[in-house]
């Protein structure tokens, strides 16, 4: 009823046009090119003194064509655009597989402390002892939580971490003299899409492991594909269907008995922190997305951080740089020949040491929660996902049966059969209800997938409203209210776009509109 009432109110508002096109706080915001002026600028710049050009004849000869705006105009433009965005500070962000959790403000404040916020990667090591100690402590926490031996902090994101772990595996295989023969990586169909891409990028051949009807990877299917040519398996646990792999230890043993390595995609570590240690399960390498498990900001292109933990088998092949304590001082080992040991690291993943701001935020999360708090966060993430599963199981279909899930719950589109409504339509209707859509059509092993991950951040009241909203949408679809879905979103700043054209023919440059007289002709 609440959903019907809000839709009626919204429709009534649509019958009262305004002169500006704005509707109270829902303001239309043109492009900068459409509100700025080309004959002015928002700042005063002195005329430069005479100088000798050094661009070799490549100097600009025409006006640059950028609009000038005052500071208030510029500020209002970006604030209005920000009000049209959905973020974790706006509401529940149910993207499955992404773990859009609250970024604790305590962590933000700590990251802004002098010495962390203004540290420079080229400072002498003697002046950044505190920063190196923090990196060392973060690494200690990560290897303790995973029961692994070594950690590489420098990878910048999950896929970068995957690359790091797989490069360590490749280096270990080459050190055994099997680089030319062990060139196959097993990747389950339910894996994250970056897994096969990462393996192929560094020269491995990818062999899929098919998904079964129960959503799990079975050790028999793995054993059938093992041989002297297999270098590793890349398995996600908990997997992308939101399920813990019950045969993971048996799979690890089979992999090791065949002389291969076990890479675990750690994107879903948030579900098992304090409950299960990947090292105990036989994992050799695993990346950890700091934003997904330890609440650092989720990116928008960066800054990301994807540390990789390595088993004793792979620890000698950890990349540089890494922190080492020598004579009571912290040092950053920058070069392979400084690493020591019988095996040399495979090299360097990135310039400098990684994302200091993310290290600070992650360690702040760990210290403020403690081991019991991090364990509770995982328990609450799993509880919240199962609460949503239980609240929707009678209306929305579960592809692998109504059994407990981990941190995320997966629905398919079987419940939409004969309604004329698609997964995409449901997602668009969620926008009208004030929610960011869940992850759609992923994982690919489920038709019309709808993957929902509430994380531990959400309260029971927040989950109750979300469940009630989805129940209202489900009942509308089953009653035949197609118009609510196929035309959605009705209340967003922009209506439904042609996403195929937008992806294939993006408009990346603003073109001035034709003069009115010319357009009329």
Image: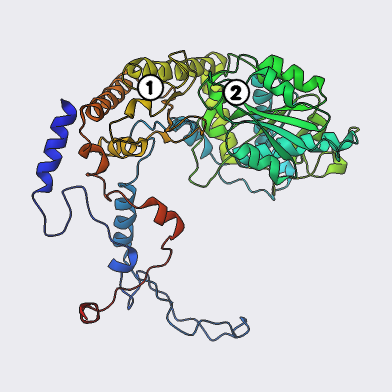
Judging depth in this view, the residue of 212 and 301 nearest the camera is: 212
**Colour basis:** rainbow
Residue at 35%, 41% (x, y): give it. Answer: 86
Name the front one of labels 2 and 1: 1
| Element type at mark 2 | loop
Residue depicted at 76% across the width and 19% down the height: 254
In this rendering, position of residue 242 left or right of residue 313? left
Height in image: 51 above or below 377?
below
Residue 85: % across, % down: 34, 45
Label 2 neighbour load within 10 Å: few <14, some 14-19, many 20+: many
Residue 470, disc: none
Residue 258 appears anywhere in the view: yes
Q: At 48% from the left edge and 45% from the top edge, which residue is drawn?
A: 300
Query: Can residue 155 be seen in this snapshot?
Result: no
- Mark 2 or mark 1: name the one nearer the start of the chain: 2
Other residues around mark 1 within 10 Å, as few (<14) / some (14–19) / many (≥20): some
Depicted 253 relative to depicted 3: above or below: above
Q: Secondary structure at mark 1?
A: loop
Tag on residue 397?
1
Residues at discs 2 and 1 in contact (Cβ within 8 Å): no
- Residue at figure coordinates x 73%, y 27% from the top left: 225
Residue 290: x and y in percent read 57, 32
Q: Position of residue 79 (x, y in %)?
A: 32, 51
Q: Quadrant of residue 335?
A: top right
Q: Is residue 84 left or right of residue 340?
A: left
Query: Which of the 4 quarters of the picture holds residue 329?
Result: top right
**In which quadrant of the rendered image does the C terminus lie?**
bottom left
- Point out residue 197 in the picture as x, y percentages from the top left corner: 64, 42
Residue under pointer 2 = 237
Name the side, left or right, on which 509 lies relative to 199.
left
Can you tell which quarter of the image residue 371 is in? top right
Gap between marks 2 and 1, in whole Å? 23 Å
């Amino acid at each position: 009823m609440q959903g019907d009432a809000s839709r009626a109110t919204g429709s009534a508002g649509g019958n009262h046009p305004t002169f500006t096109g704005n509707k109270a706080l829902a303001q239309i915001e043109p492009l900068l090119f459409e509100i700025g002026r080309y004959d002015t600028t928002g700042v005063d710049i002195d005329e430069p003194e005479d100088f000798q050009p050094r661009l070799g004849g490549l100097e600009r000869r025409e006006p640059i064509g950028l609009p000038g705006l005052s500071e208030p105009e510029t500020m209002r433009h970006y604030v209005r655009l920000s009000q049209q965005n959905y973020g974790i500070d706006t509401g529940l962000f149910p993207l499955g597989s992404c773990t859009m959790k609250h970024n604790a403000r305590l962590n933000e404040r700590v990251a802004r402390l002098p010495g962390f916020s203004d540290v420079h990667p080229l400072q002498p090591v003697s002046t950044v002892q505190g920063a190196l100690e923090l990196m060392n402590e973060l690494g200690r926490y990560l290897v303790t939580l995973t029961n692994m031996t070594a950690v590489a902090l420098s990878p910048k994101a999950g896929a970068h971490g995957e690359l790091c772990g797989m490069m360590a595996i490749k280096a270990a295989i080459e050190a055994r003299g099997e680089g030319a023969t062990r060139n196959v990586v097993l990747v389950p169909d339910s894996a994250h899409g970056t897994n096969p891409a990462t393996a192929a990028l560094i020269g491995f051949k990818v062999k899929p492991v098919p998904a079964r009807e129960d959503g799990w990877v079975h050790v028999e299917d793995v054993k059938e594909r093992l041989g002297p040519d297999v270098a590793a398996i890349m398995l996600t646990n908990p997997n992308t269907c939101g399920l813990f792999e019950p045969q993971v230890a048996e799979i690890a043993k089979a992999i090791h008995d065949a002389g291969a390595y076990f890479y675990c995609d750690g994107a879903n570590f948030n579900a098992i922190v304090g409950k299960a240690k990947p090292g105990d399960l036989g994992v050799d390498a695993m990346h950890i997305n700091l934003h997904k498990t330890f609440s650092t900001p989720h990116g928008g292109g960066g800054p990301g951080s994807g540390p990789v933990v390595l088993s004793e088998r792979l620890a000698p092949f950890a990349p540089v740089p890494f922190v080492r304590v020598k004579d009571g001082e912290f040092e950053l080992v920058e070069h392979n020949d400084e690493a020591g040991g019988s095996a040399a690291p495979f090299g360097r993943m990135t310039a400098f040491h990684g994302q200091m701001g993310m290290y600070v935020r992650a360690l702040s999360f760990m210290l403020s929660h403690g081991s019991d708090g991090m364990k509770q966060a995982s328990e609450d993430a799993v509880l919240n996902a199962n609460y949503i599963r239980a609240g929707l199981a009678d209306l929305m279909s579960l592809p692998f049966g109504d059994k407990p899930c981990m941190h995320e719950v997966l629905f398919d589109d079987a419940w939409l059969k004969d309604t004329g409504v698609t997964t995409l339509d449901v997602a668009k209707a969620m926008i009208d209800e004030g929610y960011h859509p869940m992850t759609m059509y992923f994982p690919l092993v489920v038709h019309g997938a709808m993957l929902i991950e509430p994380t531990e951040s959400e309260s029971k009241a927040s989950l109750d409203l979300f469940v009630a909203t989805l129940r209202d949408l489900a009942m509308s679809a089953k009653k035949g209210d197609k118009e609510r879905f196929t035309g959605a979103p009705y209340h967003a700043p922009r209506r439904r776009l042609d996403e195929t054209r937008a992806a294939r023919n993006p408009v990346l440059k603003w073109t001035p509109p034709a003069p009115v007289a010319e357009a009329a002709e």
